[in-house]
Image (cartoon, helix red, strand yellow):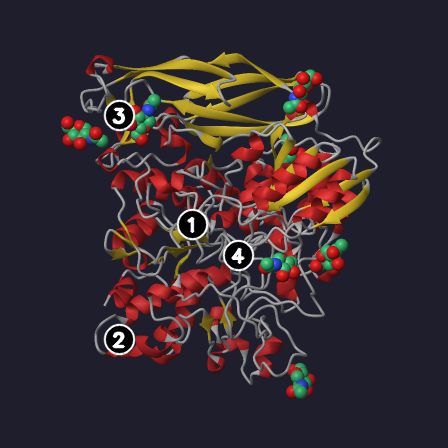
Amino acid sequence: MAKFYFLLCSILVLFAISEARNAPSIATINDSPSNLTKIYTKICDPQRFNDLGLDMDDFSYCDSSLSYGVRVKDLIDRMTLTEKVQQIGDTAYGVPRIGLAKYEWWSEALHGVSNVGQWNSKATFFDDIVPGATSFPCPITTTASFNQTLWKTIGQAVSNEARAMYNLGHAGLTFWSPNINVVRDPRWGRTIETPGEDPFVVGTYAANYVRGLQDVEGHESTDDPNSRPIKVAACCKHYAAYDVDSWLGVDRTSYDALVTEQDMLETFQKPFEMCVKEGDVMSVMCSYNNINGIPACADRKLLKDTLRGEWDLHGYIVSDCLDLDCGNYFTNYADKAVIQGKISEKDIDEALKNLYIVLMRLGFFDGSSKYESLGKQDVCSDENIELATQAAREGMVLLKNINGTLPLNAEEIKTIAVVGPHANATTAMIGNYAGIPCKYTSPLDGFSKYAEVKYATGCADVMCKNASLIFPAMQAAKNAHATVIVAGIDLSIEAESRDRIDLLLPGYQAQLITQVAQVAKGPVILVIMSGGGVDISFARDSDNVKGIVWAGYPGEEGGRAIADVIFGKHNPGGRLPLTWHEGSYVDMLPMTSMSLRPVDSLGYPGRTYKFFNGSTVFPFGSGLSYTTFAYSLTSADKNLNIQLNKFQHCRDLNYTDDTFKPPCPAILTSDLQCDDNNLVFEVKVSNTGTVDGSEVVMVYWVPPKGIVEGPIKQVIGFQKVFLPAGGSQKVKFQLNACKSFGLVNYRGYHLLPSGGHSIMIGDNLLSFAVGVKFQLA
Ligand SMILES: *[C@@H]1O[C@H](CO)[C@@H](O)[C@H](O)[C@H]1NC(C)=O
Ligand SMILES: *[C@@H]1O[C@H](CO)[C@@H](O)[C@H](O)[C@H]1NC(C)=O
Ligand SMILES: *[C@@H]1O[C@H](CO)[C@@H](O)[C@H](O)[C@H]1NC(C)=O
Ligand SMILES: *[C@@H]1O[C@H](CO)[C@@H](O)[C@H](O)[C@H]1NC(C)=O
Ligand SMILES: *[C@@H]1O[C@H](CO)[C@@H](O)[C@H](O)[C@H]1NC(C)=O
Ligand SMILES: *[C@@H]1O[C@H](CO)[C@@H](O)[C@H](O)[C@H]1NC(C)=O
Ligand SMILES: *[C@@H]1O[C@H](CO)[C@@H](O)[C@H](O)[C@H]1NC(C)=O
């Protein structure tokens, strides 16, 4: 019944399964699949209708002088019920009788055009004509750059490649990316695909990447959002409260996430709200799990009231299958369901309308003159490969650098030992939801540009099940001027359908690091590849390990970026987008406890930097540089006095101690007219060191003392600036106090508390108070 309930929600339903299977076929409009000589890039081509023995003039849906609404209605009205239901699976079979071509909805572009997708008829594939596409770093690494322009620029580069591949019949136009679930628990296998643990950062990444993929220059906004042309359609997934894949027998397809309204609004829905409102995304995918007993894909409040209603989605909703009968369930049975009165044909029409409007906006019917010239030369272009390298460099996070050991000096380091299971990493660097990259630059390749490399794996693979290969790695380290150990994890430890059981390095990896570091002749640098955090306290605390760099999963050019950072060609400026917890954290609470706040009754600690107050390996936001920065406050609004009228009632807030409680603790933000720029301040950032570098100006809100439900702190803004040595720059923030200082209470109200708020830059590099006062009428 639930299956049909969500058609009642008048949403479009598509099926997806997440495992890639191989069997490519031609993607772009091709009415007789055996004949690959003729590929059309649009439906409404008179020649194409001619080929089908039809006259295009007979079909109003091809009349571009009419509105999309009228044309789509014409198209749907021509279909029989059986034909209609054939179009609501991820393979829309088309209706040759009326000139409608088949369309494969499922393509992926998480960090480059990917060939992951439908198993029997892939929309996107590689072959001799298009052998590969640029594989950018995985999102967790790109996020670490904290560079919003970069996030958008990557989206633009990916959509150029996608459009070029579409023109060549090698890709669809609808991509089910990005993955914007918040990393609530450090064990989650899909951390690699995401922008980390902070809802605001995740939402900001989503909006930028989506705009990069979707926006057609000059059409970023319009009065009629349902006709705004788009380049390729993105999809924010998986809505919502999804971050358990497979953990100790708990499976995502049957998991019932028990979530409070407070966590729902503040954490799980927040990035989706930003994706829809700020990114104007074309599609949202609902998630596998149930939320408080209701399948996410059948939750009327979540889908219809919130997503379509409150947030005003202009696009379609797609289901992720396994909580449904995947395969051909709908295309096989939805017509019978209509006949039996379980769903109405009108609802199917509504779903089709949402679908075909999207395809019209993509130019699937009329073409897109702007992108028609894109071709083979635009895929894996030098420019895009360079962008992938830059993204990897910007995503590198320097976590330790004793006595300024790094950067290494290429004049002095003539031989370098490059050891560890990832020393010659290739496929590991591109993670999951990847395509075939243009090429790889492994760490070995990268370092060999700087010095003579002595290579030893130290472990047979990431699992490192025995110690037999450690000795040769020690020998290499003994004989080199410097040693780089490239260790970490890969998809055999963290992946879709594979949550982690611990946060440690697998097998004998820790022993490898310790023993190599003990005997090495020169300085030892540890490079970690991973999506989630790894407990490497032993290396952090060892005087033998002079430097630590987190490389994430840095994409096809990762090895070049790592070497460039270690030899100082690039000064690192990335920051951790998630807390690196100690190994013991996972013993304190089960993965299935959804609460972000501590659960005192069960002794569970809080989650993410916002609510966890214990010790960590490296906190959220960590990241060093080869230079130093200083901050000063140049201007700030330090008071916000709000005159209340008689309709604005004070709301109570729970305080740890009532003596902290102001007379009017809070006001509903919906009762306040909060301007977008009612919280303005400017800081001067100076590069006080001797090398050029980039700094992430990370702005946190610290709520007034004693508010029970408030976070410890929370990111409310960030900007990245490049500063030459000795240079400085003023950085201005224009925020909205209702959003930045607002909290959601346990009853689900958005409130602005009064009292002494603080704004803190970085790890308390600078902080100042902002008083919020309500003056009663
Ligand atoms: C394929 O289509 C083209 C153009 O429509 C036609 O000229 C050609 O004969 C067809 N080839 C085959 C093998 O059907
Ligand atoms: C951010 O990324 C953009 C686009 O790639 C780049 O031009 C810019 O230099 C980067 N900014 C910083 C501060 O690194
Ligand atoms: C590094 O990996 C590549 C790709 O797997 C392989 O061709 C090459 O031989 C490896 N290099 C060494 C030195 O083992
Ligand atoms: C240890 O690993 C090496 C290299 O993979 C293998 O040759 C050897 O048989 C393994 N030894 C044991 C005891 O498993
Ligand atoms: C850092 O440098 C100081 C001064 O040269 C030295 O005493 C100390 O041992 C060094 N620390 C490490 C961990 O190498
Ligand atoms: C840290 O959080 C725990 C709940 O997880 C709480 O019991 C404890 O008092 C907090 N400690 C501090 C210093 O705030
Ligand atoms: C806040 O206080 C109310 C009234 O005392 C109580 O019912 C509620 O559980 C408290 N909420 C929290 C989150 O402590």
Counting from the top left corner in percent of width and height, residue 501 is at 42, 49
Instruction: State whether residue 758 appears in this view.
Output: yes
SS for tag 1? loop
Counting from the top left corner in percent of width and height, residue 396 is at 62, 37
* Residue designated by label 4: 492
* Residue designated by label 2: 338
Q: Residues within 10 Å of mark 3 (few under 14, many from 20)?
A: few
Answer with mark 4 or mark 2, whichever residue precedes in sequence: 2
Tell whether label 4 touches label 3 (CB within 8 Å): no
Query: Which image quarter: residue 374?
Result: bottom right
How much space separates mark 3 and mark 4, taking CA atoms? 41 Å
Q: Find residue 708 and name its label.
A: 3
* Residue designated by label 1: 501
Viewer-closest of 636 and 724: 724
Answer with mark 3 or mark 2, whichever residue precedes in sequence: 2
Q: Amino acid at mark 1?
A: Ile
How much space separates mark 1 and mark 2, taking CA atoms? 46 Å
How much space separates mark 3 and mark 1, taking CA atoms? 32 Å
Q: Residues within 10 Å of mark 2 (few under 14, many from 20)?
A: some
Tell whether label 2 touches label 3 (CB within 8 Å): no
SS for tag 3? loop
Q: Is mark 3 within 8 Å of ligand 7?
A: yes
Q: Nearer the viewer, mark 1 or mark 2?
A: 1
